[in-house]
Amino acid sequence: MDPQSTQLQQAQLAAILGPDPSPFETLISHLMSSSNEQRSQAELLFNLCKQTDPDSLSLKLAHLLQFSPHLEGRAMSAILLRKQLTRDDSYLWPRLNPATQSSLKSILLACIQNEQTKSISKKLCDTISELASGILAENGWPELLPFIFQCVSSDSPKLQESAFLIFAQLSQYIGDSLTPHIKHLHAVFLQCLTSSTANSDVKIASLNAVINFIQCLSNSADRDRFQDLLPAMMRTLTEALNNGQEATAQEALELLIELAGTEPRFLRRQLVDVVGAMLQIAEADSLEEGTRHLAIEFVITLAEARQRAPGMMRKLPQFISRLFAILMKMLLDVEDDPAWHSADSEDEDAGETSNYSVGQECLDRLSISLGGNTIVPVASEQLPAYLAAPEWQQRHAALIALAQIAEGCSKVMIKNLEQVVAMVLNSFQDQHPRVRWAAINAIGQLSTDLGPDLQVQYHQRVLPALVAAMDDFQNPRVQAHAASAVLNFSENCTPDILTPYLDGIVSKLLVLLQNGKQMVQEGALTALASVADSSQEHFQKYYDAVMPYLKAILVNASDKSNRMLRAKSMECISLVGMAVGKEKFRDDAKQVMEVLMSLQGSQLETDDPTTSYMLQAWARLCKCLGQDFLPYMSVVMPPLLQSAQLKPDVTITSADSDNDIEDSDDESMETITLGDKRIGIKTSVLEEKATACNMLCCYADELKEGFFPWIDQVAPTLVPLLKFYFHEEVRKAAVSAMPELLRSAKLAIEKGLAQGRDGSYVKQLSDYIIPALVEALHKEPDTEICANMLDSLNECLEVSGTLLEESQVRSIVDEIKQVITASSSRKRERAERARAEDFDAEEGELIKEENEQEEEVFDQVGEILGTLIKTFKASFLPFFDELSSYLTPMWGRDKTPEERRIAICIFDDVAEQCREAAVKYYDTFLPFLLEACNDENPDVRQAAVYGLGVCAEFGGSMFKPLVGEALSRLNTVIQNPNALQPDNLMAYDNAVSALGKICQYHRDSINSAQVVPAWLNCLPIKGDLIEAKVVHDLLCSMVERSDRELLGPNNQYLPKIVAVFAEVLCAGKDLATEQTASRMINLLRQLQQTLPPSTLASTWSSLQPQQQLALQSILSSAS
């Protein structure tokens, strides 16, 4: 900056902070200016003041707040002060001298007493709370709480309201500082809420303060001290309603909903009264819809508060029944609007009201939160009357309700399928088209939620009904919906169910394709695509009839009104191509690609659906054509990368701001709240991004080394998306792509297709991907995606192997500790939930499902450790030592079988891969292992007996003292009468293998004349094909060295040995390697030549006739 302008700025600063107030007021008004230039100039000066003289700046703001006659000026200075006193990068307080600090505190309290404008009072309360939250705990503002308590007991409603607003905010920020005053606060709240004179604003403010305070109390005994306030809290609501103050009532309801969501158990003792009052509000026709919807929201929120009060609402069946009736009545609020019938798209919902949509949404939420055992009896009681009613709205409501509750009630509805299906199919004949539409809609929804049971049991009734509905040419909406329902039905359906109906379905859909109504054509295309996808090669016979129509639409539907039609034709062509396969599709594929390429080159508008459909169509064409697709990649990839790199379209407001994101009703916006920010996101952008990321993953997976040229662009696009928290699908796709990219690079280099790159490229890529995955795993909030990330990390480790550096292994091990700890604490929380008062069987089911997901996480941890142990062998052991305190608890009897199995497998891997180096762990782990050999769970038994075999092989003298116990444990497994049942077979085979290893490595410690023949008696083993090859190879070696105990006195066990060889050889490649098989054949030949004929004859005669024949042909042919 040149000296002149610096001088100018200093002069400006001196004026702004000088004795004349007007330059400062001008600066503040410029900060609110609508002209960007004026505003940014003012911001620059304001920040300079802040840097050079924070004391003067703060006092100037405070002076303005106290004395400015202009509302905007006072409001702006309250906001600016709050910003300076917020503990973030611009926190000013510590830079102010004590005198300034003390003036500011007293001016703020003076302003609260003198300010007459309500909106500014609220902003002042914000500023005071913000400052207090930073300094109150260190006793930096001892006057504040006495002042607020004084305001509460003053006779000024304005001061009372401000005091409660500050209490509410302090409870949120620093509740602990208020807890010592709990008695005093209780008295203050009680007095205000029960006062007959307090005005409604003060009561709402105190309700807000009570609810925030209850939420900040960490122990339930403290919370229970406020139980006696609940009737008064509810009265705030009823009084407002009785006085016709619905806006106040709605504020109260919103606060109570917050309480129901965070502290539902606080309401438990008075649940009947509270819920009863809410249902009364919901039933009151005289009240505004908004009020009634909030009362319903309160009850549904309680039902959904499963984490905190599991099962509580199921204890009130009479209320559930009342609520269901209220929601059913809301579904009647629908008119038969002509616009519905003449609509051009399936989305048109003319005639539906906000009551109708709230009713729909709440039925869905209620059934998901309470489950089928609670909801189905209520529905069975109420729906028949609706279905039998003369008004179409009632019949329509019953079918809509059935579709809404299906997801939450699926388990119970599957048990009563006959009734459910009959109810819906009868309505296919209803005289009113909207009822027929609702019936088709219900079948579509039930096909999704109750599949595949519905498909398997009722295809012969459902499919013909849908085909018939497609004939309803008077009602295109019904036709189009029937086609969409075919999609839902076939998505959950196997080819054998669908094939017999294909003739009828495909010919109908072809008729609809030639129909004038675009919506019907679109429905038909989607249905054809899904039918082709579900019937796969069975669709070949329709290909020649269908493809010309599809190509015609693709080429001719070119104007804007047909965009969706063209997009759907792409989807349909690509799915049909995948179904019938490359040979059948090849010639048309070329033409289709030409059309797609020219479209790709044209300028499509941003909201054109063609883009995302085209992305998916390209990827399917690639799957269908395989390596033949490579020439098209240069056309496909640039726009795909562009879509994958889309920035989310985000608007951010503060969560407590009054201006909610304006178009919150807009379907295309989704809002999420993160901390104190409310974030609105355009969903269409996210969906396109997710599709593109999935496609990239598809290409890498399909083209393998052929994808290599694109890795340099794709990796930097996808790696950052491992932490893309706006959209799960984007994260999942990025996670799945990581190992594919590494694999592609490794294969390209191995096959010499890497354009001059060498192995160091794989290392670079691995150094980029693996740390990023580990870091993303550390921050991942979703359990299912955690499991995906671990799986993906494991696959990456398998590709990278020894390219990993020690520091990377260290970070993976640290992350595994973290994963195990987090998983255990989630399990502990669930165990807590299981101890809640109202816990019931349905909650138990849900917890079981959540825990199964947790096992998926442990499973992946085991896989990763296995891979690291196989890769680094003994050099991994220092890390294993660190992990042992995390893994040892997994052996406990209180753990699930799956956890015990994983812990044992990890030890097995260590013993097998590290051999002698692992012997030092035997003392710790062998006692567990021996005990687990007789676990009731067959998978745990299998892992344990396998480990025993490994220890027998590598344990040497350490294993010797345990041979006796090992034999008796193995014997228990082998002698079990059910040992050869399918569930137990793997454990049996592994026990036999372990017994063989004891015979091989510890012959001197066993009664070999007894044990070796007992082992031979168990052969051959046929379940575990890996162990079978090991065991039969061992048998071969023993025969080759004429093992005395194996052949037995006078070779008496020879017939058994020959019989085993015969069975193994007859099984082809399954039970022995080629090498073992040829050794067996040689041995049999030698026996033929060396044994006395009588022995030979008796040996042969012990075989079954087909084995004799098979052996003869093997022996004669293999010379």
Image (cartoon, rainbow, N blue to C red):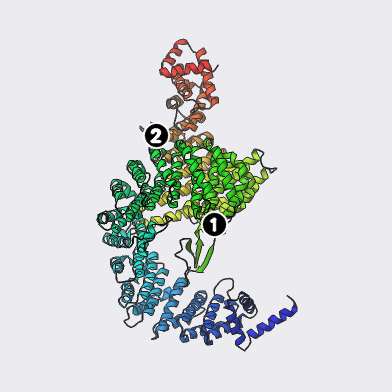
Residue 473: percent from the left, percent from the top? 37, 49
Which amino acid does the dot numbered 1 rest on? Phe
Left or right position of 937 against 109 = left
Q: Hey, which quadrant is residue 310 in on the image?
A: bottom left
Q: Hey, which quadrant is residue 317 in on the image?
A: bottom left
Looking at this view, is 136 or 51 the one in front?
Answer: 51
Residue 170: percent from the left, percent from the top? 46, 74
Left or right position of 842 against 823 = left
Residue 268: percent from the left, percent from the top? 32, 65
- Residue designated by label 1: 724
Q: Residues within 10 Å of mark 1 (few under 14, many from 20)?
A: some
Q: Residue sitting at 32 percent across and 81 percent down?
A: 195
Which amino acid does the dot numbered 2 rest on? Pro
Label 1: which secondary element: loop
Q: Is residue 223 visible?
A: yes
- Residue designated by label 2: 982
- Quick one: quadrant of the N terminus? bottom right
Q: CA distance from mark 2 to mark 1?
A: 45 Å
Which mark lies nearer to you, 2 or 1? 1
Q: Hey, which quadrant is residue 749 in on the image?
A: top right
Residue 591: percent from the left, percent from the top? 57, 42
